[in-house]
Amino acid sequence: MDDFPAATEAAIHRWFGIEPPNDPGRRMAADLVRTIAAFEKLRGTLVFEDEPSSFESALQATKESAP
Amino acid sequence: MTALADLSLTEAAEAVRTGQATSLELLDACWANIDKANPTLNATIWLDRPQAEADARAADLAVRDKRPLGKLHGVPMAHKDMYYQAGRLSTAGSALRRDWRPAITGTAVARMAAEGAYVFGGLNMAEFAQNPTGHNKTFGDCHNPWNPPYITGGSSSGSGAAVAARMTFAALGSDTGGSIRLPAAACGVTGIKPTQTRVSRYGAMPLSFTHDNVGPLCRSARDCARVMSVIAGYDPMDPTSAREPVPDYEAALTGDLKGLRIGVPETYFLDGADAPVVAAMEAALKVLEGRGASVTRMTLPLMDAVATYGSIVSRVEAATIHAQWMRDDPQAYGQHISGRMYPGYAIPAPYYVEALSRRGPVLRAFAAEVFGAVDVLVTPTIASVLPTLADTDIDHGPAGTEHRFMAVSANTRPFNYLGLPAVSVNCGFDPNGCPIGLQIAGRPFAEGRVLQVADAYQRDTDWHTRKPGVLS
């Protein structure tokens, strides 16, 4: 993980042509290790059939019928 | 004159309708407070008094001629400067759009105009609606009306400050991670983030397609109910808006909370909470119990998933929208804006798709467990006492300031990923004289319910009617 910040900056440059805009940007990009760790904890919860469109149906299914 | 500006939005509309006040008098009253408070607050980006006076005179003529009057007839307003009005400035709080004038008018503004409201200015905001504090590199920071060195909350910073300082009777804000509720809390006003899809986003500057919401900041729950009754509902110009019927939100404001089940999360929302905030929330719960509600302490499910997935979605979408400017002119942004967006380019697409894919199942599981047991959730809107602008200034502060900055919106962001409606009301003041916000969240499309609870609370308390020191 020691080269994570440099690898992240290189990947962003390669894929998007965008450079680190400033030190806060570099720090927050380096902080993605926490996002990865949080995401790892959630592994195995995605169901094969899940798709984004189910959110609107979930709103309808869970709505309050009358105030 | 100033006393007219103390009227609530609904009272002001009634005063015009019944001839007790003219629209021009309301505008003058707002202007007196702008002259008095705005040099301290910096709540506006532009003002257009000549057009506003013309609109006010037209509104007064309609009253004189006994023409049909709308729900907001003759009420002057200013909005977060990201709501498009054809031919008028819409800066999004950024140097990149300093002179930009859209060709279209947004649906929310158009619907309010159809009910008789008119717009006299654009209000300060975080650049592209991207901070929870009110810092702004281009137009200057917005200052808290109760204690100016402290944050207003953001990103609808000018909306919160201007409504609190009686510079406008209401203001539209936008809420992608708390940007209506945070300034409502920090400035001591009432603001509602509607259910995702409840209000059209056509003609509102985008930040996150998945999490963006349009909603009002006002001085009371009743005022929010009035505005919501005007702006909510399906819009063919925004195919993502829901075809859900719009109820009579004001009719739901009965004050009766008998049988209402309130859930208070014992974890996450109170993590690191400051004692004055917890005390204010507990006192508010007593008030609600006095109206017939019962309180249950509970642990909420899935909060790790909500926080992680929500963060991924917001960062990727903001980064995507801003990619061209981030390549071509990154220094045009404040450091905290471009700095926050930058990591969004490194989040892998499968992470983003998984975060989107899980949103429906997470909402279903969350709602089944939580709303099977209670009707609404009550939390602090901001867990800490308000920080100062200096304490949260990433651009000029030491490394680590970003953690204090992000903590401000920790309690509001979850309801954006979940898509739930949530209102913030003032429930007291901290030792620095800054307001404390109480957040009330409900099931999808339960705007009436959360406003009912907020209104019931405001019937027994006077926090929402107090005037900030900047007006004394």
Image: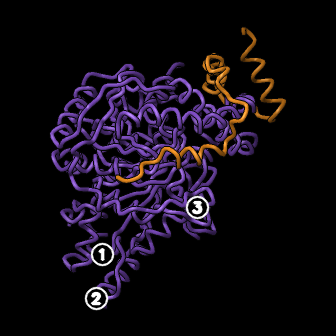
Chain colours: A orange, B purple
Which residue lies under the disc numbered 3? B203
- The residue tagged 1 is B23
Describe residue B131's horizontal placement relative to residue B448 as left or right: right
The chain ID associated with circle 1 is B
Left/right of residue B470 with respect to residue B215 in the rendered view:
left
Q: Where B37 sits versus B183, above or below? A: below
Disc 3 residue type (three-letter): Gly
The extreme top residue here reads: A2
The amino acid type found where label 2 is placed reads Arg
Q: From this viewpoint, is residue B39 visible? A: no
Secondary structure beneath dot 2 equals: helix
Q: Please tell me in which quadrant of the rendered image residue B287 appears.
A: top left
Q: Is residue B242 above or below residue B383?
A: below
For the point 61% across and 64% down, the residue is B101
State which chain disc 2 sits on: B
Report crowding for label 1: few under 14, some 14 to 19, many 20 or more residues within 10 A (C-alpha).
many
Q: Nearer the viewer, mark 2 or mark 1?
A: 2
Q: Choose between B230 and B80: the one closer to the eye.
A: B230
Which secondary structure lies at badge 1?
Answer: helix
Q: In the rendered image of this protein, does residue B337 appear above or below residue B64? A: above
Residue A20 locus on image (x, y percent): 71, 28
| Amino acid type, mark 1 | Ser
Mark 3, mark 1: which one is toward the viewer? 3
Residue B151 lies, in percent from the top left, at: 38, 36
Quadrant position of the N terminus of chain B in the picture = bottom left
Where in the figure is residue B467, as x and y percent of width and height? Answer: 21, 49
Sequence order check: which comes first, mark 3 or mark 2? Answer: 2
Regarding residue B211, the answer to whether it shows in the image is yes
Q: Who's the residue at 32% across and 28% down the image?
A: B385
Quadrant assignment, res B112:
bottom left
Q: Position of residue B164 (x, y in %)?
A: 30, 50
